[in-house]
Image: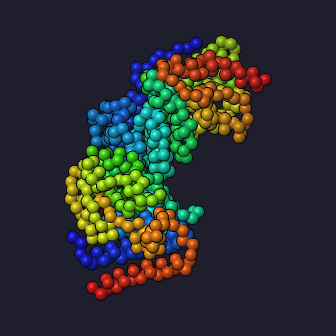
Amino acid sequence: MRSFEMEQKTTRDAFGAAVYDLAKEDPSIIALGADTTNNLGMGPMSQEIPKRVINVGIAEQNMMGIAAGLAASGYRVFAGSFAPFVAMRSLEQFRTFICYPHLNVKVAGGMGGLSASNEGVTHQCPEDFTIMRSIPGNVVVYPADTASCKVIVRELNKHDGPAYIRLGKLPFRKVFDENYHFELGKANLLEEGTDATIFCNGTTVSRSLQAFDVLREEGISVRVMEMPCIKPLDEEAVLNAAEETGAIVTVEEATILGALGGAVAEVLGENHPTIMKRVGLNDCFGESGELEELMDKYGISVESIVSAVKSVIARKR
Amino acid sequence: MLDSKQETEFEILAAEIRLETFRELAELGFGHIGGAMSIADVLAVLYGGVMKIDPENPAWEDRDYFALSKGHAGPAVYAALALRGFFLKEQLKTLNKSGTMLPSHCSRIHTPGIDLTTGSLGQGISTAAGAALASRILGGDNYAYCIIGDGECDEGQIWEAALFAAHQKLDHFILFVDANKLQLDGPVAEICCMGDIGEKFRSFNWHVQTVDGHSVAAIYRAIEAAKAAVGQPSVVVLETIKGKGCALAEEAAAKGQGIHHMLFPDQETNRREIARMEQVVSDLKAKRGSR
């Protein structure tokens, strides 16, 4: 089973650095934080171009409105705070004043999923995908590591309209390098296989690849696809996987209700009913603890993925 | 300085805004008459000359920005926009109807002249502050104007934005509080008493004025004073009467009936009200002609 080294930097650092790189080339880029500018990696940009890093204070709802006003005036805004506060506390502001007018505001949710780890349930947000994908016109992405995060931020900036990008807290495992390819609404094929397909993103990519290795040892051939965009979803990749491998497993550090697994199930249910299994938080809150421990405890372990793959393959026979 | 000719022009526009707003709501049969009527005068001053706008080019980059934070009074803004030529007055008849460019609450993507989507209370103040911030960073001379209600000040986000605008010294941000003293459920003072709103903003380091919200001259002077206040945002508390200038609404309010949202089912009564409002407009125009 392959192993992945832990990164030095976080996806929050990568996000801030990527926004800064964009800002150097484009004067219309502006960054906002709610007492979270340093936390979201905007520190270096703030020191060099302080006029374009605005700290609105601990006021996420106001931040969304300020972001809307700046975007309505022509700015391309990158705003962020912690996932539960942007995906829940200021959700209405994001939905009605940014998404409804389809403004250029990309919102980062740091400490998304379970990654707030020791901060506990108040700061965790495994519900963010489900909530954010329900809003018309919104884009929802989850980078797996720093290299892919930088590429994703750069590509997202080319998209006119709102987006939500989930970030972690501590460093993730390194999966990709600077050659990472991102296309909005497209999955990335990581491993080819014929017996089943795993769709994963973010922190579950490394685990899914490890599950691939375990299954290969046992003679089971699994396709592994990274699905960085929960929305728009690569429906073609889902339907091809259903057609070609006949069994699907979704793996995510999120609730299984209405997130990546839900999105995939919707596509399959309407177009190509296929045996599938959703691996993720099973309608429960997390708790305080280290991220990797929590993922193991809440059913997102390599063993759980292996077991889910075997179960869908068994059911299709 | 405001000369008497311009003052009369503002008064005529205010009367026309009231008339067209009433026509919109009567056509629909219901609507937020009270809070629309109470802001007609400030809208007349803003759209009648103070705001830099170009009906031929709503996206003109030197324009001023406006957010009707109390977005339910949108029909009054639509009346002002139509009267200024952003779109044909005929469009006003489509208010709230399927396919309209004039939704109940203001929408950036539907209506020429609307820059900032509003509707849910407590929000427009933040988006307007964002526009004022953009103007300052860009070094432009665009002003951002915003109208909130006194009941709307219950919303916590009003005070988040107030703190932010003062901290950022947004002196191109001019906020109006339509202090009509009534909210959906009844008197503001009885529901969650705001006390002295002006003092609250003063404590947030805003430049504060309180004026008669139905005096176009007082509103105009307040805007001039607000523009002269450097280094801080300005709030003008408009002492207003909910339903002002609409006899039907004023009479209902006098009987203690709620006029936040009113039904207009009686065509004959509507015709009388429209005739009365038309008379107000013609009297003002006669005053202009006789000068």
Nearest to the observer: residue B277 or residue A144: B277
Frontmost residue, A46 versus A255: A255
Q: Quadrant of the N terminus of chain B?
A: bottom left
Looking at the image, residue B148 sits to the left or right of residue B141; the answer is: right
Judged from this view, the residue extending furthest toward the bottom is B290
Q: Position of residue A265 (x, y in %)?
A: 67, 35
Q: Is residue B148 visible?
A: no
Residue at left offset 62%, top offset 26%: A279
Q: Residue B235: horizontal and vertical position, in percent? A: 29, 56
Q: Position of residue A157 (x, y in %)?
A: 44, 41
Give the number of marks. 0
Asked which quadrant contains residue A26, the reply is: top left
- Judging from the image, the colouring scheme is rainbow
- Residue that lies at the very extreme toward the right in this rendered image: A317
What residue is rendered at 39% in x and 46% in y? B156
**Res. A292 visible in picture:** yes
